[in-house]
Every structure is written in C-alpha cells, then in structure tokens.
Amino acid sequence: MAAVAVSNLRRDGELAGALSLLAAEGIEVVLLKGAALRVRRPELAGRFQCDLDVLLRRRDLERAEALLLAQGFRLDETFRDRAGLLRDHFHLGYERRGAMVELHWDVDPASPPGFAERLWERSVPATLDGRPCRLLAPEHQLLFGCLHLSRHAFHGGLRWLADLALLLSDLQTPRDLARFEAAAREWPRRAVRLPLWFLGEAGVAGAREPGQDGGAGPLERALLRRLLPHVLVAEPWLGIPDWRLAGALHAWLFSGRSLAGLLARAAGRGIRARLRAGAAYEARMASALSPAPSGVEERRR
C-alpha cells in the first residue's frame, strides 16, 4: 500500500497541475470515481488510481483540450480516433508521463436527456489540495458507481465493487435513498440493481433495499452467485473464458434477455445441455414448491 501511495503522489503531481490549469481558466470540474473518493476519505491515499476522471460542461471541452495539449498532454486514440470518441463515447483521455486525465462531458453513452445537467445541479463544492472542484451528490455517486461497474460487466472489477460499499455509507437518510431511487428509474434496472444486490448477498450494510432482487429471477440469481466471483477476478467459469462471460453478462445487464441463453451461446454447444437441464430442474422445483390453486386442491381430494 505504501508503494501505491508513493506512485499516487507522483502521478498526483502531474494531475494537480492539470487541475490548477483548468481552474485558472475558469473551467469548473466535478471529480469522479477514485479522485472523488479520495477527497471524501483522505485515508484512501493508498487506493490505486491510474488516472483522474473529471466531468466538465460540453461547452468547455475544446478549451480544456487546448490547455492540456499546450502542457504536453497527448490524446489517447488507441481505442478510437477523436471524431469517433466524440460521436459514440462520453470522454477523451489525455496522457503525460504516465498520468491520464479523462475529460468527461457525460457519464454514460446512453444517458437520458438532461441527465448531465442534473448531475451539475446537485453537485457540491469541494477542494483538492486547496484547488476548487465539485463532487457528485451522494445519490449520483452511487448511481454512477453502479453503472460504471455494469458497463465493464464486472470484469476485473473487485476494486470498483469495494468502492460501491463505501459509497453506500454516504446515503445516510431516507431522503438520500429516495433521491437515489428517483435517479435510478431512468436507467436499465439490472445495471443499477445487480451491483447492489451482490453487495447485499455479501452482507454489506444498506445494500439489500436498493439492490432489491438485482433485476434477476430465481434461476438467474442462482447463476449469478456462481458467475460473478469469477468475472470479478477475470477467471474462467465452467470452461467459459472470462471475456466471454463478461460479454454475456454485459448483454444481460443492458437488455431483457435470458442469462442462461446468453451463457449458453457464450459457451457453445458443449455446455448448453447442462444449463438447460439446470433451468428445467429449477422450474420443476419452483412448480413443486408453489401452492396449488384451491380448485386443483379440491379435485385432488
């Protein structure tokens, strides 16, 4: 942890310079993800952080890019070129000497209309090493954390899941929870609820109520209890490569499709029979345990 803290300090020197530059030019930013957590909790200096994620207003994007370029930062176009990122994505990454600044103008490629503006309206002022910045409101911090983990399909996301457990503790009142519920209704239910459901399964305080059923049926929850621990540490499961598991999980999180069907497709024919047999068994058990309608019971007598 000490080595991580030292590495963070070195990287923070680069990132602090970028923040100072933006602040000097009157460009407001909202800190996201690890940077926001470390502002709220200084004891997390040892948390690994490879970049600085900030939300800025879309009208300030080009000006912020020009400032970073003038200081020797370079646009990361390994994933897609700038035009493609502006069209299909929601942030640009600028790198200098191992430090990455990600300029977000939104928090998801499928944000509901006006959602980014609502993030700004509910954001709160803060400081980072004496520099002015803003943080998302607690309900939006938690919502963004859930969406970020789900967009990555939980793949290698153990650290992000641990962050969610910390963010849950910031919802301190029924009013905070009501605000989270109102914001969550705009997003795919599974993508928001599943991370919290899984924390509830692990016994994390406060997770069961917002997690609900994870957006999953009984059979899907049984599969997820076995699947998610492997995806979180990027390991195969039942012979299915971790990247295929993540692809199936991502498709399930952002659709109404069947998890068993998606896993069967990811696995190929070799495991389909096992999954179908398991689904059939679960269905028979559910039927056997369900109370019979009164008319049927009478006829049985």
Image (spheres, helix red, strand yellow):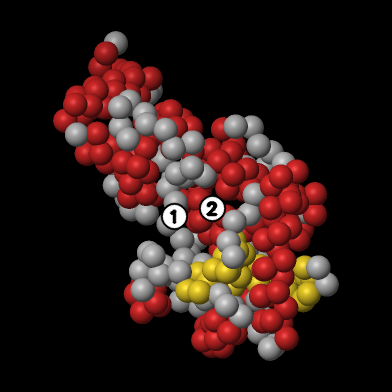
Left-right relation of 224 to 138: left
Image position of 247 with respect to 82: above or below: above
Residue, disc 1: 151
Where's residue 83, x and y in %?
36, 79
Left-right relation of 271 to 183: left
Residue, disc 2: 146
Quarter of the rendering occupied by the N terminus: top right
Image position of 27 with respect to 12: above or below: below
What is the three-letter code of the residue carrying label 2? Cys
Q: Which of marks 2 and 1 is nearer the N terminus?
A: 2
Near-viewer residue (130 or 278): 130
What is the three-letter code of the residue carrying label 1? Arg
Residue at x 68% of width, y 88% of height = 25
Quarter of image, res 142: bottom right
Where's residue 175, x and y in %?
71, 59
Image position of 236 with respect to 259: above or below: above
What secondary structure is found at the residue carrying circle 1? Answer: helix
